[in-house]
Image (cartoon, rainbow, N blue to C red):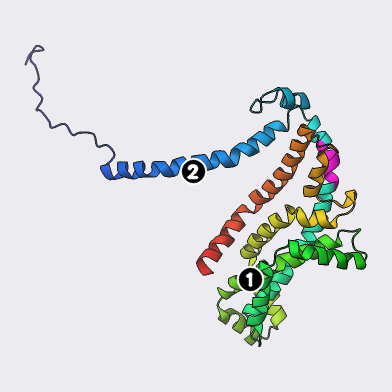
Amino acid sequence: MTSTDTVVVPATTARPRRGPSNGLLRKRVRQIPIYLVVTVLLIVMVYPLVWILLGSFKTQDEFLNNPTWALPESFGNVANYTEAWSSISLYLRNSVLAVFPSLALVIVLGTAAGYALEVMVFRGRSGVLMLFLAGIMIPGQMILLPLFTVYFKLHLTNSLWPLIITYTATGLPLTVFMMATYFRAIPREVFEASTLDGASAIRSFWSIGFPMMRNSIFTIALVQFFFLWNDLLIALTFTTQDDLRTVQVGLLNFTGQFGTVDYGPTFAAICINMLLVLGLYVFLNQRVMRGLSAGAVKG
C-alpha cells in the first residue's frame, strides 16, 4: 500500500447528543414562577436592610441633597456609629438587664410547668393547661393600665422590675403550651424507669426531661427573645425615666423635639441593634432548626 492510497473507514452511525429530557425541561419550566416569587421575596426582604446599612455611612447633607438610592460618598465614615454608640450603649444595657432575666424565668418556669402538665398525673391538669391557653388570647394592651397601677403602688415604677415581671407573665402561656406539646413526644417509659430507679419528680425533670428538651428550649428561647427584645409598647409604658429605657424606646430619642431626624446616627443605631440580633440568630441557627424539626415530626 502506497502513501497515496486512501484508507476507507467504515461508516458508523453517529449517535445524537442526548439533551435534557422533555420531562426535565417541563419540570424546569414549571419551576420558573417559583424562582420568580423567591427572587421577589428576597428583594423585598434584603433591600431595606441594605438601604439601612448604606444610609448609616451617609452624612446629613447626603440624605437631604442626594437621591435616596445613591451610594454613600465614603464607606469610611464611622462618625455616625461613634455618635450612635454613645447613646445606644445605655439602652442596650437596659435591654440586656430586662430581657435576659425574663427569658431565664420564662424558660425555667415554662419548661417545669409543661413537664408537670404533661408528664405528672394529677386532677385538674387539663383545666390548668386551658388557663395558660387563655393567657395567649388576652391582648397585651388590656393589662397595661392595671399593671401600671399595681407597680406604682408597689413603688416599682422607677426600676426595670416592671419590665421583668411583665415580660415573664406574657411569655409564660405560649412557652407552657409549646413545652407541654414537646414533652408529649417523649415516651413515658423514660420517666417511669427513672421513678423505678428511685428518682423524685424534680430529679427526673432536671436530670432527664430538661436535657432531652435542649433543642426545643433553644427554639422557644429564641422566639421569646425576639418578642421581648423588639417590644416597644410595654417598655414605653413602664419606663418613665430616660436612663431606664430599652433599645427600642431609645431609638425614638434620635427624633428631635420638632420632628427633625439625624438620619446617619439613627440608621447606625438601627444597624447596631440589627447586627446584634442577627449574630445571635446565626449562632443558634442549627439548634433552632433541629428544634423546629423535632416539633414538626413529634408534635
Q: Position of residue 110 (x, y in %)?
A: 70, 70
The span from disc 2 to disc 1 (Cα, nearest Å) is: 33 Å
Density class for disc 1 (Cα within 10 Å; few <14, some 14-19, many ≥20) is: many
- Vertical placement of 253 versus 128: above or below? above
**Circle 1 sits on which residue?**
177
Q: Nearer the viewer, residue 142 or 76?
A: 142
| Range covered by the magenta-colored residues | 84-90
Q: Position of residue 292 (x, y in %)?
A: 57, 61
Asked if residue 207 shows in the view, the reply is no
Give the farthest residue toward the front: 258
Main SS, magenta region, reads helix
Q: Is residue 89 magenta?
A: yes
Q: Is residue 122 magenta?
A: no
- The three-letter amino acid code for the residue at tag 1 is Phe
Q: Quadrant of residue 67?
A: top right
- Vertical placement of 146 versus 50: above or below? below
**Circle 2 sits on which residue?**
38
